[in-house]
Amino acid sequence: MNNKVKIRWGIIGLGNIAHQFAKDLMLIDDAELVAVASRNLEKSQEFAKEYDCPKAYSSYEAIINDSEIDILYIATPHNSHAALTIKALKNNKHVLCEKPVALNYDDALQMITTSKANNKFFMEAFWTRFNPSFREAYSKIKNGEIGEIKYINADFAFYADNLEGIGNRKTDMSLGGGSLLDIGVYPLFLCYVVLGIPTEILAKSNFHQTGADLQTSMILQYDNAQAILHSSFVSSSNIKATINGTKGRINLNTIWHQTQSYTLNIGDYEEEILLPTKGKGFTYEIEECHQCIKENRIESNLWSHQNSLDLIKIVDQVRNQIGLEYPS
């Protein structure tokens, strides 16, 4: 693909995160938002108008069938990620799909198999992996600047004041509700990237009446390290992550999964390194999608198909530990 040609985006699912994504998309010179889709036409038209987008669809099928779209960003509830991604890939679209990649490993594997069969780019939208502060901190960790990693502590928790009602993505089990899939995947992502696949997982949850987990605490055991992680809809937390090594530690500062800085501590030395993001920070995963598409690659080297499969397998293990089962 010619590097000067704009990559044409469509967005499926027009909730809060789609608004944030669209704002960042407008900051990318070679990106163009050409279509959006919601099951509510009025909502779709309002979204399109706000971001100067020429097409507003009232069905997901319609936007998937639009031949003028290069890549679709899927921001619908978790339960629809697999089906929509597979349809889009089969219909000659590249796909950036919001996390979690799917409800389980088997669905994720089908998505990736479809990407390979149709030679189309596919990536789970784990924007933290492309965050400048995260990338620089991770580089220091890999280079051994804080020694051998022995302990990770990370949480993602906030108080959600409205958890009732059918269609509430946080607690509706038919939508893949619960704190684990919605926000618990972030601490698990961090441990996976830094330490790999754990040898053992211990997890406990408190549940909503629907069966969705309201809060989940996890201990991840590694051969020479441990991690303590937490996700919750019933109380707030610092949303800070600390990676502790034999020589020092690194704090990914609040809100750590979209952090604008990290703090390096080695002995008596402490330094906060500021790396503000362009826009909200979705810009970096967008740029990664563009680079891969222009280089005719179907996956990213920074967050690969295998990375998504490994992570969802870890999530499945936690689900089994806490007894979380979805209707589908």
Image: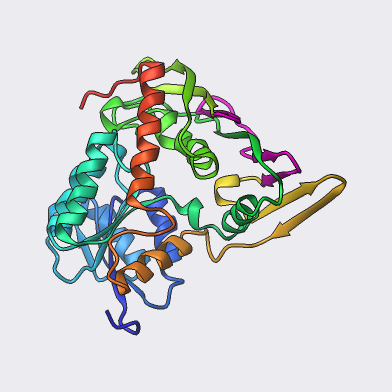
**Residue 163, how many percent across, how many down?**
42, 26
Quick one: quadrant of the N terminus? bottom left
Q: What's the residue at 36%, 69% (across, down)?
A: 290
Q: Quadrant of residue 317?
A: top left
Seen as rendered, the residue at the extreme front is: 223
Relative placement, left or right, of 229 versus 89 is right
Count of numbered marks: 0
Q: What's the residue at 79%, 54% (across, down)?
A: 271
Rendering colour mode: rainbow
Quick one: quadrant of the C terminus? top left
Q: What's the residue at 67%, 50% (across, down)?
A: 144
Of 104 and 306, nearer the camera is 306
The magenta segment is: 223-252
Q: Quadrant of residue 143?
A: bottom right
Relative placement, left or right, of 156 versus 75 is right
**Residue 149, how many percent across, how many down?**
64, 39
Confirm whether residue 58 shows in the render: no
**Residue 249, how many percent across, how many down?**
72, 43
Please check the rendered image and state whether residue 239 is part of the magenta-colored stretch, yes or no: yes
Confirm whether residue 15 shows in the render: yes
